[in-house]
Amino acid sequence: MRIFVLFFLLAVFSVSYGKNIKLKDLPEELSNYYPPKSDKMEFVELMHLLSTSMTGVVANVREGDWQNAEKWAKRLQENYLKIGKMVKKWDKLLKKDDMEKLVKSVESKNKMQTMGFVQKVGKSCVQCHKSYRLSAKIKFHSPDFEGMNIEDPVSGLDYSLKDYMKAMTNDMKMMRIYLIDGKKSKARKSGFDFIKRFDGMTQMCGDCHTDKLSEKVYFGIEAEKRITTLREAVVNGELTKINKQLKWLSQNNCSKCHNVHQTPYLLKEKFGGK
């Protein structure tokens, strides 16, 4: 029984995306139900209520429990109509007649009609998710790094995250360039500046990643060993060892963070980071 319900709901709510994904602009009203305007996440809560109500209808209809099916159908209708009240632009997209017929079919204990209207109402959910869910995830659920400053351990100034990353990346490149060009003192200076800025990242990451596991993954014993080896290689001007340690840091620290945060950040810029 549970397996059937699961597969039925998957059929209702599954979305097939094409090769070209477009981020659609979201209605401005939707911002009223997400931070910073609201910390209650009212619209997300509404989506959870809708999903639960739909599951309640399907499960009880399959079990022949029409009394509870009717209860969930009415809750589904109530929550479904709230979408249009919260976001006026989406009110016209709602299948209100089909929603009403769904409730009536449950009241009349018509299993075939009920499942048919569940499909029709569910299709309107799928269409909306297909158009807007990715945009909502990017705009409202991705960390916003705009306005975030980090104290630069080299200059002592406050840098934006973008400027800090640029300075740290430039240190890394100049360290290599100076070594190849035979300018060892300048290479050491750039190398030490890179290490200081890399270590300085903990002050920003620690604002969100507060548990010990996060520290272990990104700035744990192995990372410390690599930094120590890198520092020694910088002092001795050993380019091969430097490249080896930088490669490890890139794959195990930089890439992991970028894969999680940089991609949605770049997409978020489409919405002006707001």
Image (cartoon, rainbow, N blue to C red):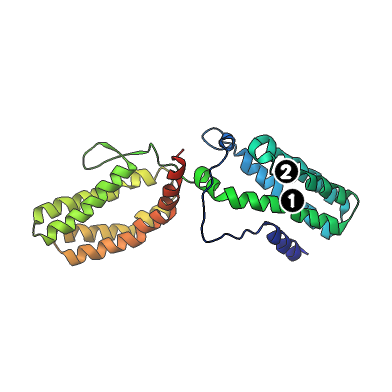
Residue type at the position of mark 1? Val
Q: Earlier in the sequence, mark 2 or mark 1?
A: 2
Instruction: Residue 223: give its label.
Output: none
Which of the two residues, 45 or 122, is positioned nearer the viewer here?
A: 122
Residue type at the position of mark 2? Tyr
User: Disc 2 and disc 1: Cα gap in Å?
Assistant: 9 Å
Residue wearing tag 2? 80
Which of the two residues, 272 or 245, is positioned nearer the viewer here?
A: 272
**Where in the figure is residue 100, as x and y percent of width and height?**
82, 45
Q: Nearer the viewer, mark 2 or mark 1?
A: 1
Determine whether, in the image, residue 136 is placed left or right of residue 56: left
Instruction: Residue 121: give its label.
Output: 1
Which of the two residues, 210 or 200, is positioned nearer the viewer here?
A: 200
Q: Tell me if I can see residue 64 in this picture.
A: no
The residue tagged with tag 1: helix, strand or loop? Answer: helix
Q: Tell me if I can see residue 165 in this picture.
A: yes
Residue at left offset 20%, top offset 57%: 231
* The image quarter in which residue 89 lies: top right
**Where in the figure is residue 197, as x and y percent of width and height?**
26, 47
Determine whether, in the image, residue 186 is placed left or right of residue 212: left
* Structural crowding at the residue carrying mark 1, measured as other residues with C-alpha within 10 Å and reported as few (<14), some (14–19) or many (≥20): many
Residue at left offset 17%, top offset 51%: 190
**Where in the figure is residue 35, as x and y percent of width and height?**
53, 36
**Where in the figure is residue 29, as x and y percent of width and height?**
59, 35
Residue at left offset 68%, top offset 60%: 10
Determine whether, in the image, residue 76 is placed left or right of residue 68: left
* The image quarter in which residue 159 lies: top left
The residue tagged with tag 2: helix, strand or loop? Answer: helix
Q: Classify the position of the N terminus by image quarter.
A: bottom right
* Structural crowding at the residue carrying mark 2, measured as other residues with C-alpha within 10 Å and reported as few (<14), some (14–19) or many (≥20): many
Please give the count of numbered marks on the rendered protein: 2
Circles 2 and 1: CB atoms closer than 8 Å: yes
